[in-house]
Image: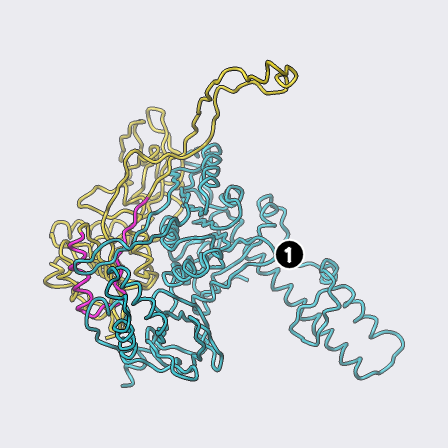
Chain colours: A yellow, B cyan
């Protein structure tokens, strides 16, 4: 198993995702002899997981069952133990396409790592910067565990002061920091002289304004700011009762018509979708720009 | 310096390259062909002078339709920076127009911007030549010919590629009627590694959009195709892709002997042709040199036909081999067909614990899919979604969302496959991995 390549069977040391039910999943580190507790009972790694096919149904000790899924960056985004505010799939997908990421891309970033690694493998490279030392260590460890450490270098430094630690190599730079305008010139330095794409994610419009100004000052082109929101449609079967306006007046004057008209239904059933009661109305603004040849 | 040139060679425009022309927000995909007139934004010009220049260069269209490289400009302020490459002369013209306009001063700021934009567009004569990418082509198709791509908006396409976990080294099935845009985008994200099988309706796969990406030759080695009219047979195990007797093949073709032309490459099918070839070398022994020529041509054509049919059979067999294992890693559907039967039919080819994503312009069609999938079982994490996209104008004291936005970009149904309902005990695993699942760069099959 790895986050950048599929495999079919669960092995000791893998990270798997246990699906418990709608919108309910948890990550599991597969280990010989270990057990994982769920509300349906215990999962015994040795018998229930190791050697089983990904996607299999597993019956837990109390009798309930779950599915074991192969990890993907998307599943990881919703199940991982949250350390910081993270980006969700909707924004990640847009960023991936707008930065033109693909196998072979060299990227500098701070927080999209799994999704980026999956996209740039096997020939790309990621230079990631993490300000807090402990987080930097944890992240490096995670990459090893997820078998992607050969594609990434983690640097523990302040991107605004010291940049990404590389020069002229990146096809794309992603900034998810409080003061991205301070890092714009470092982004420019890290990028290839032939050009590349940059993206900055900021929750506040003031940050966006300062970043756009910095981008233009540094000679970036095609500066564009968008926001993207996901709308989920929950499928439901609904039943709408029909009103009773009393017997049809025609029936009284023309009895033969009354015979032909069908009996009044009590309700109509149909499938539709309903929106969730509350939805995320804002995550952040995405600002994209192109660095021209320098 | 020699070093610079080598470094830049992959960034230089070459004859035959597929490129995208851009002016402002308007894009057009064309191929660089010498001495060929190209039309873009109501202007005719030749692309000859672009050869050897760097991608993302901006050119001015001078008289005679010749391209002249524009020196990169260091623009004055944010407003100008947005339209990089605007010629100074044009700025002067527009200034003049503004000065001569009696009503300009009375316009609102929004109306003034609109006026300037319109005049700029009218007098604009620059064009930028870009290297194609999924981002650029998706925006182009959505802006230019949305009908051709079932009104798939570019951010929706972005969601599909990520939700489908499209990445190098996997085996992905694609069923689309979006002129090849979706197929090309999937291929771009796979970088030539792994395999893509295009399932297609009708007589042949439509791939015009794929060409526009300008992929290197070897990318095409990873691309396979399979006609959906054979899906049932393949699933039932009754599809025969072995070589047959060549004379048996010729009987099945339709007759179009009237269209006979003297072109050896033309694929001519028809039993009358076969018969006439046989009879003309017949018994009477006459030596008409013209007739002999015609016969030779017919023979060559028949041979060519056989070779092509054999190639086609080989391709079908190769695609069938990839599908038979029912171990594909992803499924992407985006078409004008009702998605429900397409999805139910093609899901069978996926391994368990793999993602699938279906696009439809219409929500109701996906509601049906959702319901069917829930009843059928075998999938989890089903989600029916769409995305809301808004652009912003960011300028000092004039920052606000852009006034017009896209009304809709289509809907997606995504999910993950799981094992069919029968939990396997630890002992009885299938032996090893199915053959040839991950193809390397150099295709060893067919």
Which residue is pictured at 67% across the width and 75% down the height? B264
**Is A223 in the magenta?**
yes
Which residue is pictured at 30% across the width and 60% down the height? A99
Left or right, A135 with respect to B30, comes to left
Q: Name the residue under label 1.
A: B242
Residue range in magenta is A205-230
Chain under disc 1 = B
Above or below for A231 versus B206: above
* Residue A83, picture quadrant: top left
Image location (x, y in percent) of residue B106: 24, 62
Q: In which quarter of the image is the C terminus of chain B?
A: bottom right
Question: For this rendering, which residue is in front, A99 or B103?
Answer: B103
Left or right, B303 with respect to A21, comes to right
Asked whether the viewer can see residue A171, the reply is: no
Image location (x, y in percent) of residue B394: 22, 59
Asked whether the viewer can see residue B106, the reply is: yes
Badge 1 marks a residue whose secondary structure is loop
Q: Which residue lies furthest to the bottom in this view?
A: B1
Q: In which quarter of the image is the N terminus of chain B?
A: bottom left
* Residue B232, picture quadrant: top right
């Amino acid at each position: 198993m790895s986050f950048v390549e599929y495999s079919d069977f669960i092995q000791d040391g893998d990270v798997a995702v246990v699906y418990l039910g709608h919108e309910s999943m948890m990550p599991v580190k597969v280990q010989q002899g270990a057990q994982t507790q769920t509300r349906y009972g215990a999962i015994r790694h040795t018998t229930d997981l190791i050697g089983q096919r990904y996607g299999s149904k597993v019956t837990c000790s109390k009798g309930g069952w779950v599915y074991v899924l192969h990890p993907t960056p998307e599943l990881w985004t919703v199940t991982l133990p949250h350390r910081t505010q993270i980006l969700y799939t909707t924004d990640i997908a847009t960023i991936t396409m707008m930065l033109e990421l693909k196998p072979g891309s060299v990227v500098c970033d701070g927080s999209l790592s799994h999704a980026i690694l999956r996209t740039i493998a096997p020939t790309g490279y990621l230079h990631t910067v993490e300000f807090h030392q402990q987080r930097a260590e944890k992240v490096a460890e995670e990459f090893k565990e997820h078998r992607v450490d050969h594609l990434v270098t983690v640097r523990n430094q302040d991107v605004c002061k010291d940049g990404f630690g590389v020069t002229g190599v990146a096809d794309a730079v992603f900034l998810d920091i409080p003061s991205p305008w301070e890092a714009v010139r470092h982004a420019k330095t890290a990028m290839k002289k032939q050009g590349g794409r940059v993206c900055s994610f900021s929750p506040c419009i003031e940050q966006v304004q300062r970043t756009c100004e910095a981008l233009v000052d540094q000679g970036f082109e095609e500066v564009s700011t968008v926001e993207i929101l996901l709308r989920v449609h929950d499928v439901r079967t609904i039943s709408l009762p029909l009103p009773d306006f009393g017997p049809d007046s025609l029936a009284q004057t023309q009895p033969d018509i009354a015979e032909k008209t069908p009996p009044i239904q009590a309700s109509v059933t149909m499938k539709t979708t309903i929106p969730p009661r509350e939805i995320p109305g804002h995550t952040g603004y995405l600002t994209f720009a192109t660095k021209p040849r320098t | 310096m020699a070093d610079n040139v080598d470094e830049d060679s992959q960034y230089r425009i070459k004859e035959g390259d597929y490129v995208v022309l851009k002016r402002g927000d308007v894009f057009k995909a064309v191929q660089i062909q010498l001495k060929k007139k190209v039309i873009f934004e109501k202007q005719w010009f030749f692309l000859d002078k672009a050869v050897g220049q760097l991608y993302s260069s901006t050119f001015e269209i001078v008289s005679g339709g010749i391209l002249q490289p524009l020196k990169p400009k260091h623009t004055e302020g944010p407003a100008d920076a947005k339209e990089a490459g605007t010629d100074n002369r044009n700025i002067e013209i527009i200034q003049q127009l503004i000065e001569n306009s009696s009503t300009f001063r009375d316009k609102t700021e929004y109306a003034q911007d609109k006026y300037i934009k319109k005049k700029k567009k009218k007098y604009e004569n620059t064009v930028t030549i870009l290297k194609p990418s999924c981002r650029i082509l998706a925006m182009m198709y959505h802006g230019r010919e949305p009908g051709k791509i079932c009104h798939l908006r570019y951010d929706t396409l972005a969601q599909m590629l990520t939700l489908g976990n499209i990445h190098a080294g996997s085996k992905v099935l694609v069923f689309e009627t979006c002129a090849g845009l979706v197929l090309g985008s999937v291929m771009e994200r796979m970088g030539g590694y792994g395999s893509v099988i295009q399932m297609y309706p009708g007589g042949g796969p439509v791939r015009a959009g794929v060409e526009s990406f300008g992929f290197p030759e070897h990318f095409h080695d990873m691309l396979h195709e399979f006609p959906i009219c054979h899906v049932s047979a393949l699933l039932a195990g009754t599809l025969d892709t072995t070589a047959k007797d060549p004379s048996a093949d010729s009987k099945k073709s339709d007759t179009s002997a009237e269209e006979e032309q003297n072109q050896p490459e033309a694929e001519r099918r028809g039993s009358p042709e076969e018969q006439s070839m046989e009879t003309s070398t017949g018994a009477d022994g006459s030596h008409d040199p013209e007739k002999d020529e015609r016969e030779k041509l017919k023979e060559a054509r028949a041979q060519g036909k056989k070779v092509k049919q054999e190639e086609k059979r080989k391709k079908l067999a190769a695609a069938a081999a990839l599908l038979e294992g029912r171990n594909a890693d992803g499924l992407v559907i985006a078409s004008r067909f009702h998605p429900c039967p397409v999805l139910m039919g093609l899901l069978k080819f996926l391994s368990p614990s793999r993602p699938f994503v279906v696009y439809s312009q219409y929500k109701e069609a996906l509601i049906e899919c959702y319901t069917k999938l829930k009843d059928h079982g075998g999938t989890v994490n089903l989600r029916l979604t769409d995305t809301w996209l808004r652009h912003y104008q960011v300028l000092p004291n004039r920052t606000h969302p852009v006034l017009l936005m896209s009304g809709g970009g289509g809907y997606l149904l995504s999910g993950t496959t799981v094992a069919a309902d029968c939990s396997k005990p630890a002992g009885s695993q299938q032996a090893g991995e199915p053959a040839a699942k991950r193809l390397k760069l150099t295709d060893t099959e067919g």
